[in-house]
């Protein structure tokens, strides 16, 4: 999974399915705005799937 800011810069990436992206201000401050995600995964049959979208951070 990768998360991008509005300029297309990667701000988070992981290959670990147990690790997620957090906007918790106690760990790392994430400014207000829209962020985009891209997830590539394989199902139990070995088929590759791609998910992408956006999320708006508000406080």
Image (tube, rainbow, N blue to C red):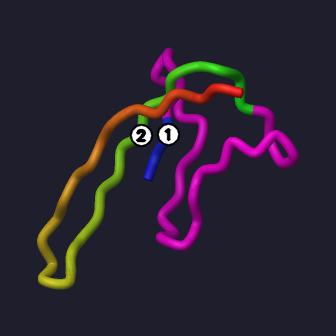
Quadrant of the snapshot with the C terminus: top right
For residue 58, above or below residue 48 = above
For residue 5, above or below residue 42 = above
In percent of the image, x 50 and y 15: which residue is there? 7
Q: Residue beneath label 2, please?
A: 37
For this rendering, which residue is in front, 52 or 46?
Answer: 52
As drawn, is 58 to the left or to the right of 41? right
- Which numbered disc, 1 or 2, marks the residue that appears first in the sequence? 1
Q: Position of residue 52 (x, y in %)?
A: 30, 41
As drawn, is 46 to the left or to the right of 6? left
Where does the magenta region start and end? 4-29
Q: Position of residue 36 (x, y in %)?
A: 43, 32
Q: Residue beneath label 1, please?
A: 3
In percent of the image, x 46 and y 45: which residue is there? 2
As drawn, is 19 to the left or to the right of 17? right
Q: Residues within 10 Å of mark 2 (few under 14, many from 20)?
A: some
Q: Quadrant of residue 28?
A: top right
Q: Spatial distance from mark 1 to mark 2, Cα to Cα? A: 4 Å
Q: Principal SS element in the magenta part?
A: loop
For this rendering, which residue is in front, 2 or 27?
Answer: 27
Q: Secondary structure at mark 1?
A: strand
In percent of the image, x 12 and y 71: which residue is there? 47
Q: Position of residue 19 (x, y in %)?
A: 58, 65
Q: Position of residue 3 (x, y in %)?
A: 50, 40
In the image as oriented, which residue stretches furthest toward the right?
Answer: 26
Disc number for residue 28: none
């Amino acid at each position: 999974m990768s998360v991008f800011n509005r300029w297309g810069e990667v701000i988070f990436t992981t290959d670990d399915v147990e690790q997620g992206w957090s906007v918790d201000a106690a760990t790392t401050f994430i400014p207000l705005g829209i962020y985009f995600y891209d997830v590539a995964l394989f199902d139990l049959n070995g088929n590759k799937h791609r998910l992408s979208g956006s999320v708006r951070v508000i406080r």
